[in-house]
Image (cartoon, rainbow, N blue to C red):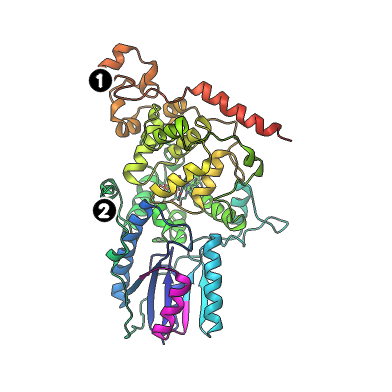
């Protein structure tokens, strides 16, 4: 009888413990993927686009191993046991996920399988350290990053990644499978993914190419350059990691042995540990994505974003029409490519939550739909961090000034000019504050504020005062 490997967020054959276990058991292997848009939070549009290509790449890497991927759509709670009976499998292996609803579904499936005498075993493929293995001195979870990162490092070097199985016993049986196209993951009309196709190569090969060029060309300068959105200075591995096309252990070790200054390697490892920290928080605080981690934010006087001016402002933010060039650049990069530079994510996030007084969950949901790397742990933890409501968060009263942020991190304007062509001809001095430019400067740059490019939708100082006032009302609440 065969063993089933149920693929989820681990769309790779290398360093895949569930697949390795099935291969080493000497039984034939059946590879299975279920598109289940109900059990867990449904994937957004950009993630579905990525998933289509990631599944195609997985099919390609399973082929030489003689394994075909069975695709189905629906409730995995039923579909996994159904495939077990159809194939006569005696074991199901999978790699763990960490959302509350994912864990609940896995627990239920495991119980059903075991009741029926089927072996069910799960593994860790997604993280360097399981969230419950990094603990404070008193045995609880961490809520502050720096001590978490120290404890994670002290927990030992992540184990070396293992290569794909060399030999897999082929299964001679047959089971129905949908065609990948039947899953309908790609956008049809309109096809908004042209910019995605230019930028991304989903799948392990694309991931490895990114990792390799990062290690040789970018790692040394990473500590400084990573903050500059006009330079391509980071790995762009986030979506590959999200879908498990590359193992975090492979990424960690590639940096560890790189020919680069020790502090660059340390800094890069810290970012991988931020990802671990997000998962640590999500696992220990399962409602991280829906509830304020600091409950005092439950009383925050968020503006109404559903009607009138609030709705208009939200729309302006989503579409990159706020009148603040760095904010608009970020939102347009996101729309066009499904990704945004980390520094700019912080700037646009802060702008939405503080300048527009919009509940962080609204921004989180927009990112969830539009990011190719939309991640249940990283997205929610980062939005709570930006909002000030999270564990170890940026304090609410620290409000990014979008003009100064633009001048500091995109001083020469490479990034802003690229994404906001309406302001591209402005001299550096006014690029991040076109409203201060004299009329002749605007004219020379081919601009008319309010016509070719919007006036700022809120005045920085007024918005800042309003946000501080709102926060103060909270601190004064008994
Ligand atoms: P690199 O700098 O090359 O870092 C390598 C890897 O480390 C990343 O791929 C990522 O897995 C991890 N990493 C880096 N920075 C962070 C960070 N600050 N927090 C957690 N992990 C990090 N990241 C996501 O993967 N998915 C999200 O949905 C997501 N939403 C975000 C929302 C907001 C408001 C903010 C401020 C940040 C968010 N991030 C998210 C974190 C970060 O912006 C991205 O991981 C990073 O920009 C991805 O680019 P990269 O792969 O080139 O990163």
Instruction: Answer yes or no: is residue 232 visible.
Output: no
Helix, strand or loop under label 1: loop
Is 414 on the left-hand or right-hand side of 283?
left
On residue 354, the disc is none
Q: Quadrant of the C terminus?
A: top right
Residue drawn at x 28%, y 30% is 421
Q: Which residue is mark 1?
A: 446
Query: Which region of the structure is painted magenta?
Result: 72-92
Q: Does 136 sit above or below residue 161?
A: above
Of the pair 213 and 146, the residue shown nearer to us:
146
Q: Give whichever of discs 2 and 1 has the lower sequence position.
A: 2
Residue drawn at x 62%, y 57% is 284
Q: Quadrant of residue 316?
A: top left
- Give coordinates of residue 406: x percent, y percent: 42, 28
Q: Residues within 10 Å of mark 2 (few under 14, many from 20)?
A: few
In 3D space, how far apart are the residues under numbered discs 2 and 1 (Cα atoms)?
Answer: 36 Å
- Give coordinates of residue 310: x percent, y percent: 47, 32
- Give coordinates of residue 285: x percent, y percent: 61, 54
- Give coordinates of residue 384: x percent, y percent: 56, 44
Which mark's residue is nearer the viewer, 2 or 1?
Answer: 2
Q: Residues within 10 Å of mark 1 (few under 14, many from 20)?
A: some
On residue 188, the disc is 2
Q: Does 223 sit above or below residue 162?
A: above
Residue drawn at x 61%, y 37% is 300
Mark 1 CB within 8 Å of ligand 1: no
């Amino acid at each position: 009888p065969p063993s089933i490997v149920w693929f989820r967020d681990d769309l790779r054959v290398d360093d895949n413990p569930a697949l390795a276990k099935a291969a080493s058991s000497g039984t034939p292997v059946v590879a299975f993927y279920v598109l289940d848009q109900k059990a867990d939070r449904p994937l957004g549009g950009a993630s579905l686009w990525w998933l289509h290509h990631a599944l195609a790449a997985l099919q390609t890497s399973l082929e030489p191993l003689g394994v075909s991927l069975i695709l189905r759509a629906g409730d995995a709670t039923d579909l996994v046991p159904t495939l077990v009976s159809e194939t006569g499998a005696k074991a199901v292996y999978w790699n763990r996920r960490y959302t509350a609803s994912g864990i609940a579904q896995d627990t239920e499936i495991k119980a059903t399988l075991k009741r029926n005498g089927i072996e069910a075993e799960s593994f860790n493929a997604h993280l360097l350290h399981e969230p419950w293995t990094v603990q404070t001195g008193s045995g609880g979870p961490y809520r502050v990053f720096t001590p978490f990162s120290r404890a994670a490092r002290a927990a030992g070097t992540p184990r070396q990644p293992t290569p794909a199985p060399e030999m897999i016993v082929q299964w001679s049986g047959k089971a129905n499978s949908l065609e990948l196209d039947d899953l309908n993951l790609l956008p049809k009309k309109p096809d908004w993914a042209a910019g995605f196709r230019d930028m991304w190569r989903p799948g392990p090969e694309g991931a490895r190419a990114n990792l390799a060029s990062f290690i040789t060309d970018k790692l040394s300068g990473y500590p400084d350059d990573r903050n500059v959105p006009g330079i391509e200075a980071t790995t762009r591995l986030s979506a590959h990691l999200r879908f498990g096309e590359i193992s975090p252990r492979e990424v960690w070790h590639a940096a560890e042995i790189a020919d680069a200054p020790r502090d660059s390697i340390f800094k890069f490892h810290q970012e991988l540990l931020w990802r671990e920290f997000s998962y640590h928080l999500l696992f220990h605080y399962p409602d991280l994505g829906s509830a304020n981690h600091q409950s005092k934010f439950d009383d925050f006087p968020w503006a109404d974003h559903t009607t009138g001016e609030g709705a208009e402002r939200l729309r302006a933010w989503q579409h990159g029409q706020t009148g603040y060039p760095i904010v608009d650049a970020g939102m347009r990069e996101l729309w066009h490519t499904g990704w945004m530079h980390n520094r700019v994510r912080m700037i646009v996030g802060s702008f939405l939550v503080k300048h527009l007084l919009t509940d962080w969950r609204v921004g989180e949901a927009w990112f969830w739909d539009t990011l190719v790397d939309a991640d249940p742990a990283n997205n929610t933890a980062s939005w709570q961090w930006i909002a000030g409501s999270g564990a170890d968060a940026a304090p609410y009263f620290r409000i990014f000034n979008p003009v100064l942020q633009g001048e500091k991190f995109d001083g020469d304007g490479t990034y802003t000019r690229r994404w906001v062509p309406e302001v591209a001809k402005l001299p550096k001095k006014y690029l991040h504050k076109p409203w201060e430019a004299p009329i002749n400067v605007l004219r020379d740059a081919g601009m008319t504020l309010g016509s070719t490019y919007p006036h700022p939708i809120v005045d920085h100082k007024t918005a800042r005062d309003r946000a501080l006032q709102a926060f103060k009302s909270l601190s004064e609440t008994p």
